[in-house]
Amino acid sequence: MSQPPRTVTGRRRLRLTGRTASAALALTVLTFMAGPAGAKPGPTAQDLAKGKRQVQDRAAAVGQIRSRLAQAAGELTRLATSAEVAVERYNGQLVRLAQTRTAYQLTQQRLTIAQQNYDQTRAQVAAFAAEAYRINSGLSDMSLLTGPGGPQGFIDRAGMIEVLARRQADTNRRMYAAQIIADMYRRQAKDGLHAQQQTTGAAEQAKIEADAAVAAQRAAVDRIKADEADLVRELRTARAHVALLKRQREAAAHFTLGMLKGSGRGLLVARAALGRLGTPYSWGGGTASGPTYGSAQGSGTRGFDCSGLVVYAWAKAGVSLDHWTGTQWNSGPHIPTDLLRPGDLVFFATDTANPDTIHHVGIYIGGGQMVEAPYTGGQVRVSSIWRPDLIGATRPV
């Protein structure tokens, strides 16, 4: 960590030195105008050298402050990226969990139908067996002569048993097939339940990791804000300059919003995103309808995370997207950066050669600018797309 900037006492000394130098200069001028009788010597070479050293010290202190601010900004960017990676991993697990649950429910429905078919066929087999036993019990050597209908009745009963035997054999085959189908769906349901349990576990683990990452980011944000509060006291004039830049930036964003005339899905998306400037970042927040309370770290904040803002903006153009950068990246053709149009999605990754490492997405509005929900503690803002972690762009369809 670099040395802390000058204290308030140091600034007072600087102001006192400045006042002393100004007083000495005024006294010299008055003495010159009054004549040589009371003349006093002007600043010596040592005085000039001391003043230069003070200027150099002050410049060095300002340089240290700027260096610490740059380090703090770099740390915040790194932690924000880590948190986005964890959050988007969790979003992806939620999508996979929903898919797994749907498949499991469908298999359960099929299993229920197959089990009903098996039970029904089994009941038919039992009925045939009972009927055959009843008829067969009356067939004996003596029934040939003494049974109902005499020999002809015996022949009729024997024919009935043969018919029942053929029907029972057919029903047995259907029962066997129904049992095979039921067993197959039972295995599929068991496998689906196991997959659902694994996916749920992965989602819970991803949530734990995301909680930890966001908590670390929030602690870093608080620490950096505290450091910044100390540093800006050494650069009071910079505060006014930053406020001016912020007003200019907001004015430029509203100007851009006004310039986005015409129709087309991309323009609708860009205008929708610009209309949400200043909305708080909320992890897990945002739906097609607008900002929402998020989950975990975002449960107390109503707003958007990066992929949630995309869901909202593209819904205004009638396109439904998953709340996950993983599927948003593949929601349409990939567009070269020199052919970007308003509404296109720009993505950022920890490894720009590997789309699986995408952790952030923004909505392009033109002029190399995008609207993004940056990180916990931030707000929806306009910023440049030209970052080292830019991996590419997509135009959803």
Image (tube, grey):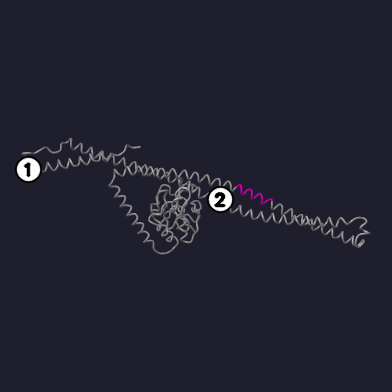
Percent of width and height locating residue 275:
40, 58
Q: Secondary structure at mark 2?
A: helix
Q: Which mark is residue 245?
A: none
Q: Which mark is residue 97?
A: 2
Q: Which residues are magenta?
A: 183-194
Verify whether residue 63 appears in magenta: no
Picture quadrant where residue 338 is located: bottom left
Verify whether residue 188 appears in magenta: yes
Percent of width and height locating residue 35:
6, 42
- Position of 215 with respect to 164 (left or right) is left
Q: Secondary structure at mark 1?
A: helix
What is the chief secondary structure element of the magenta stretch? helix
Question: What crowding class fits label 1: few (fewer than 14 Cα within 10 Å), some (14-19), or many (20 or more)?
Answer: few
Picture quadrant where residue 51 is located: top left
The residue at 68%/51% (across/down) is 184
Percent of width and height locating residue 264:
44, 63
Nearer to me, 348 or 224: 224
- The amino acid beneath tag 2 is Leu
The residues bearing labels 2 and 1 have C-alpha atoms spaced at a distance of 92 Å
Among the two numbered marks 2 and 1 on one chain, the one whose residue lies closer to the N terminus = 1
Residue extending furthest toward the top: 46
- The amino acid beneath tag 1 is Ala
Q: What residue is shown with label 1?
A: 34
Instruction: Evaluate if marks 2 and 1 touch, with contact meaning CB atoms under 8 Å apart.
Output: no
Residue extending furthest toward the front: 300
- Position of 389 with respect to 196 (left or right) is left
The residue at 7%/43% (across/down) is 34
Q: How many marks?
A: 2
Percent of width and height locating residue 166:
81, 57
Nearer to me, 203 or 327: 203
Looking at the rendered image, the quarter that the N terminus falls into is top left
Question: What crowding class fits label 2: few (fewer than 14 Cα within 10 Å), some (14-19), or many (20 or more)?
Answer: many
